[in-house]
Image: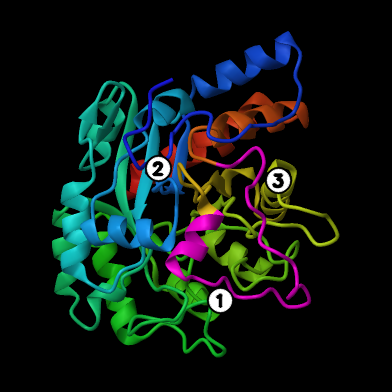
């Protein structure tokens, strides 16, 4: 195991990992699946501070320099991962983050600028992504600067909304603005994925209607299973799929839970995969785990972020980890193992693990 740099979480073996038990034939199938296309539409494959405290997070975030979990990514089976910057209203800080993300190249892992480079790299290719375009304000020229810096996926709006459209945390979603419609078209022209993961329901449906190419929800789940605004209702999932787009199922602590089940683990995450596949077809399902190398739940406390309570479940504590989907290194293999154990065909499992993303990203990028 590679030792973590001083003050950063290790990217291998930080917490025990648990998934379905498979026989030799099942393990061989998992290995074969991981040898095929494997893509994460949304992750934060960086090492968080360890120990993670208010002070250590303040010091780390002030430096605006993140370190990729190279060893974890090497072992992940990922061919492509979209590494997202945290939400930030400052374009200058986002551009600085993109320039300082390190290492740019290591054995088996590299930050790349575009799809051709991602396809040709013989390891895990890291593409840059944005949680949102709050940094744009009303100046769409910022999108050009972000695209030139290598960002290849961008959320239209974050939870609180912005001049482009509504966010999922607003009591009333104002919908996609005229500026937002222009932003969708410009993102398409600049070969940047239009991501609606944090957009409000009304805004998402409108953006999907305006789009001329597939859009994605890079990291979410089904509200039919868990009544959180962070999840997407069935009509929104259908609208995204109708563009030819993808729904990446996430695994951030407390996100893709299932009503009536205790805890949050691999089984809960994959229940959302099955729901989305049953609703819109396997061809529109992907993975967007939204995980870190480090204490994700602890980050909320250290940064002072308070996830919005889920209606009807206000007293439910945030889980410390999502067993089986805790970090970017373990998520692909555990998802593959679950699909094998659940009896999915190799063709459908391959589609979810990366085949669908490969198809759509080839068109968009």
Image position of 203 with respect to 340: above or below: below
Q: What residue lies at 46% left-to-right and 72% top-to-bottom?
A: 209
Furthest residue toward top: 24
Q: Nearer the viewer, mark 3 or mark 1?
A: 3
Give the magenta part as a residue range.
297-326
Q: Is residue 261 above or below residue 175?
A: above
Position of residue 174 measured from the top left corner of the image (x, y, whole percent): 47, 89
The label on residue 201 is 1
Q: Is residue 325 magenta?
A: yes
Q: Earlier in the sequence, mark 2 or mark 3?
A: 2
Marked residue nearer the N-terminal end (3 or 1): 1
How far apart, in angstroms, are the residues tagged by discs 3 and 1? 26 Å
Q: Does residue 126 lie above or below 318 as drawn?
A: above
| Marks 2, 1: nearer the viewer | 2
| Residue occupying the point 62% across, 73% down | 229
Counting from the top left corner in percent of width and height, residue 246 is at 51, 52
Residue at label 2? 45
Q: Is residue 357 a member of the stretch shown in magenta?
A: no
Say which element carries label 3. loop
The x and y percentages for residue 361 are 37, 44
Helix, strand or loop status at disc 1: helix
The Cα atoms of the two marked residues, 2 and 1, are separated by 28 Å
On the image, which quarter does residue 256 sit in? bottom right
**Of label 2 and label 1, which has the lower sequence position?**
2
Predominant secondary structure in magenta?
A: loop
130 or 360: nearer the viewer:
130
The residue positioned 58% from the left and 28% from the top of the image is 333
Q: Which residue is mark 3?
A: 265
**Classed neighbour count for the residue bearing mark 2: other residues with Cα under 10 Å, few (<14), some (14–19), many (≥20):** many
Whether residue 14 is visible to the viewer of this picture, yes or no, is: yes
Q: Are the residues flagged by discs 2 and 1 in contact, CB closer than 8 Å?
A: no
């Amino acid at each position: 195991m590679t030792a973590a740099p001083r003050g950063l979480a290790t990217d291998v073996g930080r917490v025990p990992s648990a998934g379905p038990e498979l026989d030799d034939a099942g393990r061989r199938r998992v290995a074969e699946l991981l040898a095929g296309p494997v893509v994460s539409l949304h992750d934060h494959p960086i090492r968080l501070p360890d120990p993670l405290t208010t002070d250590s997070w303040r010091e780390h975030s002030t430096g605006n320099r993140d370190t990729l979990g190279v060893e974890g990514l090497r072992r992940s089976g990922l061919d492509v991962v979209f590494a997202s910057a945290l939400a930030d209203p400052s374009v200058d800080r986002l551009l600085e983050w993109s320039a300082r993300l390190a290492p740019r190249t290591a054995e088996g892992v590299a930050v790349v600028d575009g799809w051709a480079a991602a396809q040709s790299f013989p390891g895990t290719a890291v593409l840059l992504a944005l949680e949102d375009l709050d940094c744009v304000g009303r100046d769409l020229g910022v999108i050009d600067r972000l695209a030139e810096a290598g960002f290849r996926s961008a959320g239209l709006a974050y939870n609180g909304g912005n001049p482009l459209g509504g966010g999922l945390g607003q009591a009333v979603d104002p919908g996609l603005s005229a500026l937002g419609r222009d932003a969708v078209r410009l993102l398409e022209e600049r070969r940047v994925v239009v991501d609606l993961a944090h957009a409000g329901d009304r805004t998402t449906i409108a953006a999907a209607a305006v789009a001329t190419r597939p859009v994605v929800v890079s990291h979410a789940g089904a509200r039919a299973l868990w009544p959180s605004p962070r999840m997407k209702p069935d009509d929104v999932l259908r609208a995204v799929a109708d563009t030819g787009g993808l729904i990446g199922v996430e695994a951030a602590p407390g996100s893709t839970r299932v009503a009536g089940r205790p805890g949050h683990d691999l089984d809960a995450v994959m229940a959302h995969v099955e729901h989305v596949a049953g609703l819109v077809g396997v061809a529109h399902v992907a993975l967007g785990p939204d995980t870190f190398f480090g204490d994700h739940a602890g980050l909320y406390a250290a940064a002072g972020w308070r996830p919005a309570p889920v209606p009807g479940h206000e007293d439910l504590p945030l889980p410390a980890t999502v067993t089986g989907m805790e970090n970017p290194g373990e998520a692909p293999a555990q998802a593959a193992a679950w699909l094998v154990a659940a009896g999915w065909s190799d063709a459908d499992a391959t589609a979810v693990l990366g085949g669908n993303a490969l198809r759509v990203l080839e068109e968009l990028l």
